[in-house]
Amino acid sequence: MSQVHQVSPGAHYVPPVTSHLFKATLDIKKHHLTGLMLIKRMDSVAPTTLSQQEKEIKDEVYRIVFANEIGMTFFDLEMKYDSFSVISCFESLNKKALIKILETDFRLLTGINPVQHEKFYRQTATNNQVFYAKTGRYKIWETFSPSGDTLYTTTGKSTIADPVIISYQNYQAGFPSRISLENPVIGLKMSLRLLKR
């Protein structure tokens, strides 16, 4: 993760140094969209050490483009440490509330904001490790395996309207080949299947 905390070596989602390409589906209310989603890092190469991370995290820039197989763009978004911009968006999706929810989803997926007030604890029922922190205006919880080397879910929210649950599945060589995002308040579900990284 690009968030400023130590994660044990193992299986978890690492934001792209250059780009990640996914086969994607997005379901929200009456809309069912399928296509390709590109998450591309636009700034310099990602930092490799924690000290570099702390210095450079504010310079990260991501573009998130979701388009169908024939090239029609559903949305094209730009995300920085302190801003989130709509480059283009399908008119029926270009709603302020939905864009704010997509911002929450992609900020938590990429870990673009540094964390504060972090702590670890164990779930009593499962013995899973949970990392809790605040990042920007968000509260986040990351659930890891009991050994702490595999990330299962990231849950976060800034208000009661935008909670998101991100699940990581089908790990291959320590990287999830499937990621699902769900915003239960509005019934949004997004499924990502990794094609290339």
Image (spheres, rainbow, N blue to C red):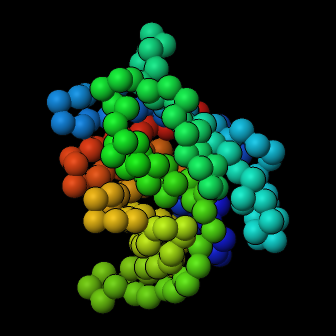
41 sits left or right of 140 in the view: right
Above or below residue 113? Residue 169 is above
Above or below residue 43? Residue 108 is below
Above or below residue 78? Residue 165 is below
Q: How many marks?
A: 0
Q: Identify which residue, 105 or 78, lies in the foreground.
A: 78
Which residue is at a point 81% across and 71% down the rendered structure image? 51
Which residue is at a point 46% across and 20% down the rendered structure image? 73
Q: Identify which residue, 194 or 4, lies in the foreground.
A: 4
Which residue is at a point 64% across and 75% down the rendered structure image? 5
For residue 173, say whether it is visible.
no
50 sits left or right of 93 in the view: right
Above or below residue 171? Residue 29 is above
Residue 90, horizontal then vertical, whole percent: 38, 23
74 sits left or right of 5 in the view: left
Q: Identify which residue, 126 or 93, lies in the foreground.
A: 93
In which quadrant of the rendered image does the N terminus lie?
bottom right
In which quadrant of the rendered image does the C terminus lie?
top right
Residue farthest left in this picture: 30
Residue 118, horizontal then vertical, whole percent: 55, 83
Which residue is at a point 30% across and 26% down the rendered structure image? 92
Residue 4, horizontal then vertical, whole percent: 66, 71
Residue 195, horizontal then vertical, whole percent: 52, 32
Quadrant in which residue 184 is drawn: bottom left
159 sits left or right of 193 in the view: left
